[in-house]
Image (tube, coloured by chain):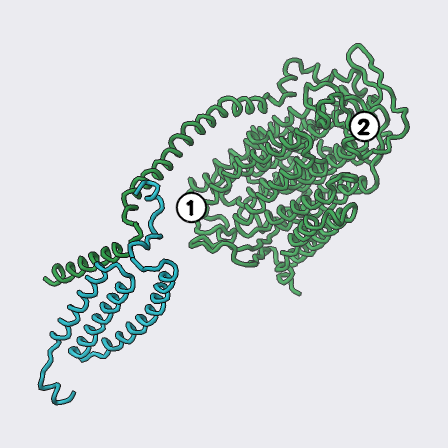
């Protein structure tokens, strides 16, 4: 079998998870736990193996023709718009399918442990498989429309999985918020597709020539900016970022898979796929870069004060995605893809680790009542420490190389403003991650008694024996509010300190720690994919055929590059050092955060995420709702309905008159026919006969 | 054509006039008579008047197509008779009479509500 024959079989990669989703949706209840989980994991694992085969087949092709397009069938033959259901395999999409199926199968495996005992166990895996299928369609689609199909599919799965525990009101609301916010971005995607179709007469990727100069730079700017709107929605960039922190209401494996490793990178993928338009338009590139830079910085500043372990990671994800946008904006596409991969490893590891902590700590997510957990969950702690060093940018771990490449590229392309932003944001990254690690795994123990300011409130230690029901999310969720029987475990900035669990946490089962450790290893060595030395930039070379015509800038000298990298590392060290000094002893009083005290009045602004969410709620809930109400009452009810009803009554009035003729008398009908015939005859004889 | 008939020298005017007469009788009968059976016979009369014109023109213009159409008309008329007579018989069984003006079931019911 030649390489191309193998690549023609790429449809198998998405077909396997689809099979899993269908089987589990139809027979999931009957299959039950844990086989449903194993089926789902196995199929995604097989899909990963298939992706590996595709990878090697692609490697086998000469490096300048690494593209293989197949068409399964005609999907929409609608006049000039002809869309095929087909797959576009190039180095970019193959990179993404490896990521999706690889990290995806690890997270599936983890979920078997995490979702143990959940009443909707098999449905969870059905959704997860459906998500993997949609995401694979997104990256493999041969045209913008097939990608859009996957785009909507992942949006749907995100909605279903964020509000998976829909008994909690907060989860249901968060799912809706994610869905609605993404709709805003989808409008951009649709408009971009209209423009592309108008310019090229096709939506196929193959129809858009590399370095196309067939369209004006104005059109290219418009298309690029509309695609950016789409990407901002999906990848949670400012100003549409607000859904991602709330999406943490979903089960933690979902946060890891969808809201850190894969789905949120769909925006990056889309911009990479459509990089032609960005190459044609310098303005659009500048906008993308600044959106990314500002997001990276602002989200980083918000993350440093969040008390909830998952919310820190959520804001961190927003911030890291900002780096990737920054890279795309300065046309450093390979750097963006490199960061996507490394980010998937270390953020996947961090989320799974956080899930393990939450799992072991009986669903309490408040870091203020954790501390010194490394004693009880050594594997989780070790893995998370590795991922922490990676994300903070400590060499030689993956985060150092990936983030540093973006920051140096900004410098080398003379975007000094973005370069400074990148460096400052890297400092914030180091601060909030160090804070997370110290509050969770080091410092003082706060799970039994919690000291509030001035007073010590002893909590009756869990002397009532072992808590056997360690997985019962509902049973063990600490609640001091009987009215809300199933409250959300999420803690926002300014919320009161959660009730400590009262006894020591436990390490998660091996089925959960194994994927965490694999991801930790990947987070450690992921940087090897693209070392900043010539001839070792393997990812660069691999992706070169997908990013043809995009010049990469390399540092003039090895020393110059090294100097840049050392500066970034120094900033990271400062951040780590700062957080370490503040949190090395943990929290003396659980409700007093040292960093919060230091920041004074600024703290409230940062902690509340610049009041952006509240402001949007106020704007949409107040004037927005009023406008919508006015539109409903006046425009819809009176103008539109009035017009429709008016036409109806007019026709009714007219028909009153005509109706008289239908009296059911055969002779009158016959008379009518006769008169008509005579009239027609007269017309023929008199007028035409002249 | 036989010599006797040829000597009479019939032009197309005669049969066409006859056909027009027959057609008018049929049409007037259809509009004035109330008995469905008689109306039906009037329709037949009109059909055959038309047949007559077809045949006359076919003869005059020496074109066989006029006669061909007559066969079609006959076939349709035969079918129509079968259906029409069937309906008339059904009406007679049900109502003991067949006055066309009584058979107004197909009229718009709204008019009844309007008091007509």
Residue at 66% in and 36% down: A162
Q: Quadrant of residue B8?
A: bottom left
Label 1 belongs to which residue?
A215
Q: Earlier in the sequence, mark 2 or mark 1?
A: 1
**Residue A400 visible, this orientation:** no
| B16, A48: nearer the viewer | B16
Could you classify mark 2 by the number of other residues whose Cα lies within 10 Å: few (under 14), some (14-19), or many (20 or more)? many
**Front residue (pair A219, A8):** A8
What is the crowding at mark 1: few (fewer than 14 residues within 10 Å), some, or many (at least 20)?
A: few
Chain of the residue on which disc 2 is drawn: A
A81 up-or-down from A339: above or below: below
Q: Are marks 2 and 1 on the same chain?
A: yes
Which residue is drawn at the image coordinates 66% and 32% (left, top)?
A: A171
Q: Chain of mark 1?
A: A
Res. A544 in view: yes
| Chain rendered cyan | B
Q: Say which residue label 2 marks.
A: A441
Residue A131, x across and y down, in percent:
65, 45
Write down the quadrant of residue B93 in the picture: bottom left
- Give the position of the C terminus of chain A as an image quadrant: bottom left
In the shown orientation, is residue A602 left or right of residue A622?
right
Q: Which chain is green?
A: A
């Amino acid at each position: 079998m030649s390489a191309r024959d193998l690549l023609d079989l790429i449809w198998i990669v998405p077909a396997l998870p689809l099979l899993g989703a269908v089987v589990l949706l139809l027979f999931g209840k009957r299959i039950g736990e844990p086989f449903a989980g194993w089926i789902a994991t196995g199929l995604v694992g097989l899909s990963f193996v298939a992706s590996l085969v595709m990878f090697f087949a692609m490697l086998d092709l000469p490096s300048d023709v690494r593209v293989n397009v197949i068409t399964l069938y005609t999907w929409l033959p609608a006049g000039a718009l002809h869309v095929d259901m087909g797959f576009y395999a190039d180095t970019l999409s193959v990179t993404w399918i490896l990521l999706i199926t690889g990290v995806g199968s690890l997270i599936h495996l983890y979920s078997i442990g995490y979702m143990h005992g959940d009443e909707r166990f098999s449905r969870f895996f059905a959704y997860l498989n459906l998500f993997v299928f949609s995401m694979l369609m997104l990256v493999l689609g041969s045209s913008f429309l097939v990608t859009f199909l996957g785009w909507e599919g992942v949006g749907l799965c995100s909605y279903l999985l964020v509000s998976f525990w829909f008994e909690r009101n907060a989860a249901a609301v968060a799912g809706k918020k994610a869905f609605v916010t993404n709709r805003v971005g989808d409008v951009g995607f649709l408009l971009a597709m209209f423009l592309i179709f108008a310019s090229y007469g096709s939506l196929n990727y193959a129809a858009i020539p590399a370095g196309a100069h067939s369209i004006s730079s104005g059109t290219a700017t418009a298309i690029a900016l509309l695609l950016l709107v789409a990407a901002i929605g999906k990848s949670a960039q400012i100003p549409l970022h607000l859904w991602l922190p709330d999406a943490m209401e979903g089960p933690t494996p979902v946060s890891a898979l969808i809201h850190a490793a894969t789905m949120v990178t769909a925006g990056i993928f889309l911009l990479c796929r459509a990089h032609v338009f960005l190459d044609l338009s310098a303005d659009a590139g500048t906008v993308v870069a600044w959106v990314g830079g500002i997001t990276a910085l602002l989200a980083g500043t918000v993350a440093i004060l969040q008390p909830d372990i998952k919310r820190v990671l959520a804001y961190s994800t927003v911030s890291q995605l900002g780096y990737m946008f920054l890279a795309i904006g300065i046309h450093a596409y390979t750097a963006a893809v490199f960061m996507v991969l490394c980010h998937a490893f270390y953020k996947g590891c961090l989320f799974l680790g956080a899930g393990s902590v939450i799992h072991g700590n009986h669903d309490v997510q408040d870091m203020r009542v954790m501390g010194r957990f490394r004693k009880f969950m050594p594997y989780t702690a070790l893995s998370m420490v590795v991922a922490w060093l990676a994300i903070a940018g400590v060499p030689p771990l993956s985060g150092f190389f990936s983030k540093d490449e973006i920051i140096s590229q900004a410098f080398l392309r003379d975007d000094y403003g973005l370069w400074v932003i990148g460096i400052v944001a890297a400092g914030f990254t180091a601060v909030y991650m160090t804070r997370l690690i110290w509050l969770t795994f080091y410092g003082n123990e706060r799970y039994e008694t919690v000291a509030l300011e001035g007073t010590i409130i002893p909590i009756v230690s869990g002397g009532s024996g072992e808590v056997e029901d360690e997985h019962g999310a509902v049973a063990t969720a600490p609640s001091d509010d009987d009215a809300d029987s199933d409250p959300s475990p999420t803690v926002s900035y300014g919320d009161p300190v959660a009730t400590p669990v009262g006894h020591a946490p436990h390490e998660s089962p091996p089925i959960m720690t194994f994927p965490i450790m694999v991801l930790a290893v990947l987070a450690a060595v992921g940087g090897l994919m693209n070392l900043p030395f010539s001839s070792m930039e393997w990812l660069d070379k691999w992706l070169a055929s997908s990013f043809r015509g995009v010049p990469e800038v390399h540092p003039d000298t090895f020393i110059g590059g090294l100097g840049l990298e050392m500066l970034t590392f120094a900033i990271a060290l400062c951040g780590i050092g700062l957080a370490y000094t503040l949190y090395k002893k943990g929290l003396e009083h659980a409700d007093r955060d040292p960093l919060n005290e230091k920041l004074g009045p600024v703290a409230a602004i940062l902690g509340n995420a610049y009041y952006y969410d509240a402001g949007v709620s106020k704007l949409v809930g107040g004037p927005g709702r009023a406008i919508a109400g006015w539109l409903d009452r006046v425009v819809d009810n009176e103008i539109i309905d009035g017009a429709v009803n008016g036409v109806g009554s007019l026709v009714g009035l007219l028909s009153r008159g005509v109706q008289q003729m239908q009296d059911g008398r055969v002779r009158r009908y016959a008379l009518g026919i006769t008169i008509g015939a005579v009239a027609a005859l007269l017309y023929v004889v008199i007028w035409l006969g002249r | 054509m036989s010599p006797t008939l040829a000597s009479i020298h019939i032009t197309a005017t005669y049969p066409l006039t006859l056909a027009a007469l027959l057609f008018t009788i049929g049409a007037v009968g259809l509009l004035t008579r109330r008995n469905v059976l008689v109306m039906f016979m009037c329709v037949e009369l009109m059909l055959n008047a038309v047949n007559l014109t077809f045949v006359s023109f076919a003869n005059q213009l020496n074109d066989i197509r006029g006669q061909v159409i007559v066969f079609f008309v006959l076939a349709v008329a035969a079918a129509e008779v079968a259906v029409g007579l069937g309906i008339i018989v059904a009406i007679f069984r049900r109502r003991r009479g067949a006055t066309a003006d009584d058979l107004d079931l197909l009229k718009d019911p709204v008019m009844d509500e309007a008091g007509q």
